[in-house]
Image (tube, grey):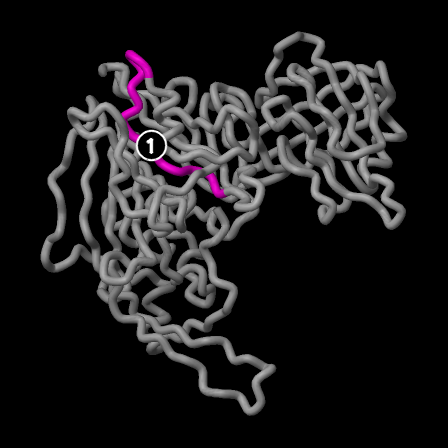
C-alpha cells in the first residue's frame, strides 16, 4: 500500500539540545525516547499455534519526547500561527508471532492471487486457498508495499524459486527464505536485470512484471505470463500513435520459469509497435518506450535468439521465497546487527517519527518474529513510528528488522487452536481486512 504518509508536511522540533544529542548518540538514559510496556502490563499469555509457532499480544506505551508543527504556508498572507502538536505518549496495540523456520513441521511461503499480478485478495482468502491436508496455514500477514490503484507490488517477489515481480536495480529492504530454510533479512539489495540481443548487445531492464506507464518515459520491462492477459502498456503521441514497442518471446524450453541467477533463452516471435498487446500463456514479452524502444528496433528482429537474466545480491539467487521492498519511503531497514541505522535516527526526517500502523519482520537467533502494530484508532491504538519501532525491537534483542508494509493493509491473521480457519486478531485501520497484493503464510505440516 502507499497511504502511510499524509500530504501535508510538518516540522519536528526537538525539545532541547540535550534531546537531540541523546537521539543521535543513542544514549540509554533518555527514557522518553525509548518505548516501554504500558504500566498496567496489558499483555496476553504466549499462545501456541502449532509446533514451532507461538503468538502474543500486548499494549506498549511510547514516550515520544518531540512535538510537531505544521509547515508554514507561503500562500497565506499574513502568515497564521502554525498548529503545534504535543508529542507526549502514544499507545500501540502490538501483536507478535515467533516462528522457528528450522522446525521440521514449519514452512514459510510468499503467495499472491492466482489470476494475475495486480490482483488483490485478503490475507485470509489467500490462506484458505493454500490450506490443505498436511499443509495447514496457521498464520498469515500482509507483505510487500503495492500500488493502490493497480495492485502491482512495488518490490521483488520470489515464490518457489520463480521471480514473480522485481524492480530494476535496487531494493531498500529484503526478506528471504533460503533453500536450507534459513532466513536472510536486511536492506540495500542490488539487482542486475539484463536483456541480451542476438548480436550480444545488452539492454538494462527497469523491472519484471511492472506496468509500462506513459509517464515513465525511457523504460523497459520483462513480462511473464503471470502478469496479465495483456501487457497493459501505455503511451501515445499527439497523433495517437503508440510510443512503445512490445516484443513477444517464446522460451526455448517450454514451461521454463524466470529464476534468479539463471539465463532464460527464447526466440522472438513478434515485434509490435503498439500498446497493451496480448500476453499468451507460456510466452514472455519485452515492453519498452523512449530510447529503449528505439534500441529494440535497432537490435531485435523476428526469429532472433535472445536471453534474459536477473541476478540478485546478498546471495538471494538461491532463495526459495523472497520479498524486497522498493520505490516507497516506507520500505526501511530498522535494525542492522542490533543497531538502529543512522537514517532512522534522523529526527529531521518527519517520516521517522510519524506514527502509523506497521507490519515489521525481525530476526533473533535464527527465529523469525512478525510484528503488527495497530494505529489510527484513537482510544485504542495510535500507531508507532519507525524510530520507536526500531528502539522497541532493539530492547527485545532483535538483530535484523525491516518495515514491510503498514497502514490499512496491516493484517495479523492466526488459526487459533481448535479453529478451522484464520481469524484476524488485530484491528485494521480501514475497519475491515484490506485486500493486498501478496502475503506471508506460516504453514504447519503437523496438522
Question: Image check: 433 left or right of 202?
Answer: left
Label 1 crowd bin: few (<14), some (14–19), many (20+), radius 10 Å:
many
Q: Which residues lie in the magenta part? A: 132-145
Give the residue at x 40% y 28%: 126
In the image, residue 344 lies at what x, y percent?
Answer: 42, 56
Give the residue at x 42% y 23%: 178
- Regarding mark 1 in the picture, which secondary structure is present there? strand
- Which residue carries the number 1 mark? 140
Above or below residue 341? Residue 175 is above
User: Among all residues in the image, which is located at the extreme bottom?
Assistant: 78
In the image, residue 192 lies at what x, y percent?
Answer: 64, 32
Regarding residue 104, the answer to whether it shows in the image is: no
Above or below residue 417? Residue 325 is below
Viewer-proximal residue among 154 and 127? 127
Give the residue at x 73% y 14%: 250
Question: Image check: 208 left or right of 379?
Answer: right
Regarding residue 63, the answer to whether it shows in the image is: yes
Amino acid at each position: 500500500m502507499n497511504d502511510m504518509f499524509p500530504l501535508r508536511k510538518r516540522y519536528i522540533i526537538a525539545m532541547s539540545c540535550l534531546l537531540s544529542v541523546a537521539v543521535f548518540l543513542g544514549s540509554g538514559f533518555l527514557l522518553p525516547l525509548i518505548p516501554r510496556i504500558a504500566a498496567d502490563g496489558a499483555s496476553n499469555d504466549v499462545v501456541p499455534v502449532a509446533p514451532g509457532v507461538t503468538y502474543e499480544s500486548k499494549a506498549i506505551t511510547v514516550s515520544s519526547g518531540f512535538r510537531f508543527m505544521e509547515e508554514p504556508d507561503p500562500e497565506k498572507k499574513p502568515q497564521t500561527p502554525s498548529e503545534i502538536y504535543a508529542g507526549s505518549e502514544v499507545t500501540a496495540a502490538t501483536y507478535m508471532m515467533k516462528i522457528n523456520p528450522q522446525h521440521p513441521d514449519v514452512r514459510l511461503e510468499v503467495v499472491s492471487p492466482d489470476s494475475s499480478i495486480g490482483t488483490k485478495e485478503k490475507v485470509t482468502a489467500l490462506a484458505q486457498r493454500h490450506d490443505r491436508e498436511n499443509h495447514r496455514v496457521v498464520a498469515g500477514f500482509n507483505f510487500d508495499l503495492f500500488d493502490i490503484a493497480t495492485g502491482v507490488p512495488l518490490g521483488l517477489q520470489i515464490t518457489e524459486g520463480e521471480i514473480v515481480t522485481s524492480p530494476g536495480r535496487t531494493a531498500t529492504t529484503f526478506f528471504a527464505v533460503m533453500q536450507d530454510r534459513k532466513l536472510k533479512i536486511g536492506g540495500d539489495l542490488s539487482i542486475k536485470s539484463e536483456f541480451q540481443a542476438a548480436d550480444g548487445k545488452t539492454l538494462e531492464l527497469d523491472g519484471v512484471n511492472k506496468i509500462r506507464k506513459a509517464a515513465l518515459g525511457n523504460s523497459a520491462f520483462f513480462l511473464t505470463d503471470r502478469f496479465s492477459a495483456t501487457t497493459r502498456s501505455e503511451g501515445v503521441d499527439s497523433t495517437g500513435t503508440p510510443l512503445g514497442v512490445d516484443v513477444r518471446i517464446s522460451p526455448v524450453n517450454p514451461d521454463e520459469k524466470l529464476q534468479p541467477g539463471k539465463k532464460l533463452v527464447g526466440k522472438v516471435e513478434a515485434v509490435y509497435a503498439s500498446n497493451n498487446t496480448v500476453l499468451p500463456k507460456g510466452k514472455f514479452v519485452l515492453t519498452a518506450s523512449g530510447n529503449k524502444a528505439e534500441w529494440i528496433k535497432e537490435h531485435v528482429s523476428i526469429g532472433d535468439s535472445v536471453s534474459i537474466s536477473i541476478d540478485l545480491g546478498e546471495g538471494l539467487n538461491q532463495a526459495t521465497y523472497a520479498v524486497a521492498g522498493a520505490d516507497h519511503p516506507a520500505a526501511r531497514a530498522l535494525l542492522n546487527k542490533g543497531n538502529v541505522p543512522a537514517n532512522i535516527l534522523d529526527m529531521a526526517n518527519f517520516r521517522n517519527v510519524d506514527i502509523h500502523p506497521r507490519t515489521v519482520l525481525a530476526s533473533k537467533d535464527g527465529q523469525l518474529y512478525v510484528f503488527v502494530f495497530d494505529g489510527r484508532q484513537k482510544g485504542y491504538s495510535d500507531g508507532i513510528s519507525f524510530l520507536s519501532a526500531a528502539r522497541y525491537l532493539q530492547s527485545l534483542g532483535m538483530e535484523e528488522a525491516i518495515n514491510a508494509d503498514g497502514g490499512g493493509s496491516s493484517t495479523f491473521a492466526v488459526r487459533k487452536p481448535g479453529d478451522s480457519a484464520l481469524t484476524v486478531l488485530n484491528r485494521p485501520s480501514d475497519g475491515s481486512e484490506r485486500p493486498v497484493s501478496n502475503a506471508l503464510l506460516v504453514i504447519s505440516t503437523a496438522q
